Amino acid sequence: MIRLLIFIALVFVVAVGSAWIADKPGIITLDWQGYQIETGVMTAAVALIGLLALGIIVWNVALFILRTPDHVGSFFRRRRKDRGYDAMSKGLLALGVGDAAGAGRYGAEAAKLLSGEPATQLLLAQSAQLDGRHEEARSRFEAMLDDPALRPVGLHGLYIEAERLNEPVAARHYAEEAAKLMPGLDWAGRAVLGYQAVSGDWADAIKTLEKNYAFKRVDKKTFRRHKAVLLTAQAQELEDRDPDAARQKANEAHGLAPALVPAAILAARLATRRGDIRKAMKIVETTWKLTPHPELAEAYAHARNGDSAQDRLKRVKALAALRAHNAEGALALARAAIEANDWDLARAQMKAALRLEPTQRAFLMMADLEERQHGDRGRVREWLARAVRAPADPAWVADGVVSETWSPVSPVDGRLDAFVWTTPPATLDHHDDPLEALDDALMEALPAAPAHLEAAPLERKPDPSEPLAPSPAPQPAAASTPATEAAPAKDAAAPDKAKAETAKTEPVQTVPVKDGAPKADASKADAAKPAAQDAGASASGPAEAKASGPETGATSSAKPSAPDASPKPPAKPEAKADAKAGATRKDDLSRPIEFPLKHMPDDPGPDDEPEDARQKKPGFRFFN
């Protein structure tokens, strides 16, 4: 735009000048060596302008002729360079797609066309690396160290080769050299920081981290987190040698990253040793609000030595209230309640924890609760079986490595702040199976046993091989009364009924017994004898009753006397009582004894034997 204005201004000046000259006519006379030339002013001006233009044209033609050789050489050089850059571009593309042969071919062509170009040396070295010619690549990178422009490139290449050969000392040396040469180099700063952290040079690592932050290689959030990790590691190392310095660094780490659990635990532990219980509890509370962790709950519960279980329970209640509806808080409160024997609270918290995160630790704690409260081994086995199938508990995981303790760097690649508190990947196939639904009744406490239980009378089945004690001798029968003589007719029929029931029983097998023990047949005859004698006693008088008394005394039970004459049944129904007793005994012997449970709850019983085979047929009882 400015040039256009200048051109318009010049044209305007020329036009104004020409008009002015035309308005003022005149004659210009040139007298030179006898020649006299006269012309007008306007004509002289036009001739002068024409001569100037002709001179300019002649001068340019002369310059073009003189510069023609240089122009020809420049043309060929420019064409060669274009071909070299085109080959280098193709080589870089081949290197990007993994074509090592093509990259090497184009790199060699580019190096021939572009002599002294640094990029061609890098292309040839990287193509050799890609093709597996590491010796050639290393020699090319070492050659770059002599060129100041290529020295950082050579150091980076040699660092990569040292990493590939697993030579940490050489790799650290190349990284430190590159960091000194170019302090703001990203890869060099990260590499030096990683090697310093792996070797435990915490102070130098902090300086390197601060230098990287000064060159804007890390953001502020990452810088604070990594510095807190390094300070925590340094405090752990100084905890036994210099507790005061360790406490200072742990507090600084907790201030930089309140969510860093190891820093909070270490700071709280050192504060507890110093006797500052309130500060230790405040540190744990701050971190608990951000990241609940079981070690935080443990440190909070045992912040003061010598506290009772009830005091620890109250303290854990306050901690769990800071982060409600959290599985870690419920588990911590349940553990404190178990130690304080508060079974109802423990069960309520365990139920909440199992609803939120049913992990192995929760099921194991439930088994511990059942063992401590009831000692019910059946329920303990149920919870232990569920724990086997439950997902794993969270742990410190870094690059697939599961660790019980936190570490500042990864054991795999030396990366800083690599460990995170998370659920490790499942290592067994059955961990992926869905868990069984939790029954509310299973998590409830067993009903309390009554204060006094009356044992139900159970008849013990006697051993046939054991001799029975003789029955007690009967007392002498008293004189019969009119009520005895007027006994109903149904009493007289009782012996027949007893005989019929006795006849229905199974045949008695002969069992050898010791001397002095009555035989089975004799016992049956003696048992039936008082029934026949009692039937004849209804027609006989008191004398016959007295005579029959000694006879039946060996086998019948004692007959109580009935002195009062009442309309009640006879006081001495010997045959009827013995017959009913015999029938009852026979029925009891043929029926197995029933227990409330076939086996105890914690006894699974035999698996191979069928149920019917386990019920043995009872034997027979022997009487004198």
Image (spheres, rainbow, N blue to C red):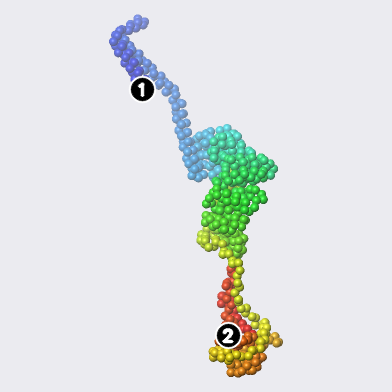
Residue at 62% across, 83% down: 620
In this rendering, would 578 be left or right of 1?
right
Q: In which quarter of the image is the C terminus?
A: bottom right
Circles 2 and 1 in contact, beta carbons < 8 Å? no
- Residue 526's spot in the image, x, y percent? 63, 90
Q: Name the residue under label 1.
A: 4
Residue at 66% across, 87% down: 475
| Above/below status of 185 relative to 459 | above
Specify the label residue 580 is tagged with.
Answer: 2
- Residue 275's spot in the image, x, y percent? 66, 44
- Residue 338's spot in the image, x, y percent? 60, 57
Picture quadrant of residue 60: top left
Is there any visible trace of residue 349 in the rendered image? yes
Which residue is at the front of the view, 457 or 372? 457
Which residue is at the front of the view, 457 or 426? 457
Specify the label residue 453 is tagged with.
Answer: none
Which residue is at the front of the view, 316 or 53? 316
Residue at 60% across, 64% down: 376
Q: Which amino acid does label 2 sit on?
A: Lys
In this rendering, would 298 be left or right of 10?
right
| Above/below status of 332 relative to 376 | above
Is there any visible trace of residue 160 in the rendered image? no
Q: In which quarter of the image is the N terminus?
A: top left
